[in-house]
Image (spheres, rainbow, N blue to C red):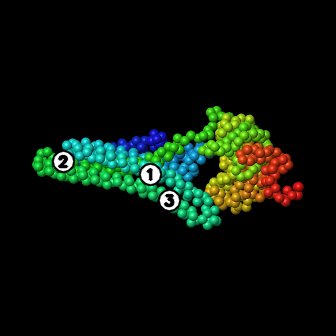
Amino acid sequence: MFKKLLKSLREYKKYAILTPIAVGLEVVLECLIPFITADLVKQIEDGKGMNEITKYGIILFVMAVASLVFGAIAGKTCSVATAGFAKNLRKDIFYRVQGFSFENIDKFSTSSLVTRLTTDVQFVSMAFSLIIRVAVRSPFMLIFAFVMAFVMGGKMAWIFVVLIPFLGVGLYIIIRKAMPIFRRVFKKYDALNESVQENVKAIRVVKSFVREDYEQKKFEKASEDVRADFTRAEKILAFNNPLMQVCLHINMIFVMTFGSWLVVSTQGTTLRVAQLSALLTYSFLILNSLMMMSMIFVMVTISIESCRRCVEVLDEESTIVSPENGATEIKDGSVDFYGVRFRYPGNNKVEALGGIDLHIPTGATVGIIGSTGSSKSTLIQLICRLYDATEGRVLVGGIDVKDYDLESLRNSVSVVLQKNVLFSGTIKENLRWGNPDATEEELEEAARLACADEFINQFPEGYDTYIEQGGVNVSGGQKQRLCIARALLKKPKILILDDSTSAVDTRTDAKIRKAMREYIPSTTKIIIAQRTASVEDADFIVVMDGGRIDAVGSHAELMKNNEIYRDIYISQNKAGAEDEQ
């Protein structure tokens, strides 16, 4: 897991290596200072002159300054390495998510991915910072101080060896109790993020139904769940500090009592005052190192679950990938379904599509209609491999979609999905999602074909009008027309409109369909619609029911032979239907 995460260091690896080196040198100097100080005290006891004492003073001053410099270098390199590591890790996770299929996204959920990119990366980077600096400093300090304690205090230093197993058992119990809580709390973070995301996204609905109190209570509950679990975990981890303090005080009592007794009883022959002073200093250094290690232990305990969650995303392989040497040229816009069946991942018992056989010639205009939940959208998502068929084959231009280079296939298939999405930026920038190199003339032509020029030209800034995130400053119908114009700019072989004109009036809907017939006759046009008026003039209409094709035919044929289509038409056009009869 850690090996996988460390791949995100890349160009910051040298800073991560320099940090422990600088820390090591800082520790060596810090550990030598008490030794030199003890020697200085010994010189004073022996009655040495000021020249000798001054020499020791200069040495101590130089060592202190050098230690400070190495500490500053370690601080700087650690900051650069940590910030760079967090940036790269966040980038790696985000890039990984960009390559996910719909199935992968469904597995993690949007809110969980947001948590992993923010909170989890933050915890991982904090742990990394402690590991390359404090986690190096503490063991170094512990080892050097331990050695020097034996040099200065002899057998008295064994007290530290006795205390370490006691600390180890205590820390083991703490981590065993705390880890399950941290695993649980990050899932609750996901729920908290989901509550915020859902509320902000649907704020207009919340306000229109006066549900602010309900949403506040929902958020408060999610927030309280996170607080309760973190409090429970922190209560367990809080035992870490008293444990360290107990060990510190036991050590100090032993060193002070037994050391003082030795100094007095042996009159300095076994242990001198200078040695006792140095031993006390090393005692503080050793126990301070242990306390810092316990702090690292706490932080790493919290971060392990975040590490696991980040690596889980990095290890996730997209369920839909381009084949090696996949076809890059799409001959035409013909679409063929042969015995296609499909089940959504995680719901293998329910068949969303069953026994689909359908053949659409290139350049045809095809309408797909059916009741809500009849899997109309599911059908068209198989064409550009947003999902893969569970059984059967889907062909575009006579070639199985699984044999195409994924980018080439999706560049040849424009889909205006049911949920229209615009991004923050100008109208021009949004339209150029369809073609980054589109000229001004091409932008205007696409907007005209989608009947979007009617309102764009009314804006004071025209195509430079700024669209807020999610397109909240344009109406539903305007958003749909901008999304259609964006799709047209791709100049696709296949254009799929998934109920994409539901928010425009019937006159504008008819104008858009007429423009598409006249200006892109060779493009295959698949129109999913709720109203029959949107598909009446199609070359043929597919009626879906319960994930299966119930009938295929023209408007006249279906009115005569298909009960589902006739019922839909009559319910939408009662007066017209009565006149026909």
**Residue named by callout 3:** 223
Q: Hey, which quadrant is residue 574 in on the image? A: bottom right
The answer to the question of whether label 1 and label 2 lie on touching residues, with beta carbons closer than 8 A, is no
CB contact under 8 Å: marks 1 and 3: no
The amino acid beneath tag 2 is: Gln
In depth, the one of 205 and 144 nearer the eye is: 205
Q: Residue at x 73, y 59 (%)?
A: 455
Query: Disc 1 residue type?
Result: Ile
From mark 1 to mark 2, how far is it between C-alphas? 46 Å
Tell me the number on the disc at residue 181: 1
2 and 3 marks in contact (CB < 8 Å):
no
- When asked about the image quadrant of residue 470, the answer is bottom right
Q: Quadrant of residue 164?
A: top left
What residue is pinned by disc 2? 275
The residue closer to the viewer here, 498 or 84, is: 498
- Residue count near mark 3 (Cα–Cα under 10 Å), binned few <14, some 14–19, many ≥20: some
- Is residue 137 shown left or right of residue 415? left
